[in-house]
Amino acid sequence: SAIDPCAALELRAIVDSPRPLVFRWSCRNDDTFSNALSRITGAVLLLAQGTKEMTMLEKTYEIVVTATDFLGATSDQVVFPILKMSSAAPKLTFMPSTLEVFRDQTVMVKVVAEFSECPIEKGSLVFEWSLASYSKGTNTVFTGNVSVFAATGSQLWVPGGVLDAEATYTLAVKAYMDNDPSKSSAGMFSMQVKKRDLVASIRGGAEISASTTRDLVLDASDSVDPDFASDFGQADDLHFAWTCTITEDGQVFSPCRTKAGVQLDLAAHATLTLDANHLSAMYPTAANPYLFEVKVSKGSMMSQYFTMPVTLTEAAIPAVSIGSSCGERLADGGIKVNAQDQLVMHGACS
């Protein structure tokens, strides 16, 4: 951040701690300024207009803050680099100050400029945005369309699906007076794009009742990488593996077998179908259902699992399923929705 010779300075340290804290402020590249800061023990550093404590112009002051609780535990240092400029310039503030988003979310960042307190002629402000840096692991080159960051105006809008998951973007904005471009300020905005886990699911509710008189279809095609849910063909990158077990004596899991003792051979596809002939060769369930589990994997991501209990009877019963596209699917087949959300359920019977 930067301030001009007439501006005030306010820095606020935020620490998540249930205990009372004492803050220690200093400047690691200016001893005189550091001595002035040492008297501040609160979370807010506030210097009056002109920041007389910062005696040198065109210098970047490296302000450091730490927090200590009553047990003596001290936080890591946080450094605020502040450039004190020699000429009047607008002060830039970002809303929000930082941002964490997911890849599929739309990004909206706004910059607010305050005119300098110095006695200069006021004019309209011009804003120019750009991508200053990018990092994802060891990669520092953004291979996407950088033009989405080349915007003018006080707001930057980036549509969902453009950013890379698990990446950090630093955006630069320059603000200057239209009647005097030499009166300018620059600011940096950091944005982190997080990554979600894969979501595994099997259609049909929390349990399926199957019959030896008809085919059993287990459909895991709703499984998804949520960061790419809207991308066409994203499901092609998912890999599926199925297993079937049944509990014996309430605690031992054994592979599902036919009456002849042959272990089930399950195809590695999103949809698993066992026809009536296969089901007729299996024992009907009693107290314990068959547990069909799908493993969903993608590249180096952590695999996710979903288990569907299936009861099997020799009686001819209809195939009934229930589901919903609302809310968040839980590992047990349930759905979590917010208190004010609409919940729409749909069922099928054949």
Image: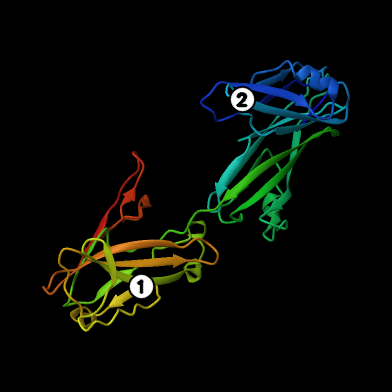
Give 308 or 83, whichever is nearer the viewer. 308
Q: Is residue 273 above or below residue 36?
A: below
Which residue is denoted by mark 1 in the rendering?
A: 271
Rendered residue at 71%/19% (across/down):
46
The amino acid pointed to by label 2 is Gly
Marker disc for residue 188: none
Q: Is residue 233 above or below residue 190?
A: below
- Residue 274: image location, x then y, percent: 27, 78
- Disc 1 crowd rating (10 Å Cα; few below 14, some 14-19, many 20+) is some
Q: CA distance from mark 1 to mark 2?
A: 58 Å
Q: Earlier in the sequence, mark 1 or mark 2?
A: 2
CB within 8 Å, label 1 to label 2? no
Nearer to us: label 1 or label 2: 2
Name, please, the residue furthest toward the left: 315
- Disc 2 crowd rating (10 Å Cα; few below 14, some 14-19, many 20+) is few
Marker disc for residue 72: 2
Quadrant containing the N terminus is: top right
Quadrant containing the C terminus is: bottom left
Q: Is any part of residue 27 visible from this angle?
A: yes
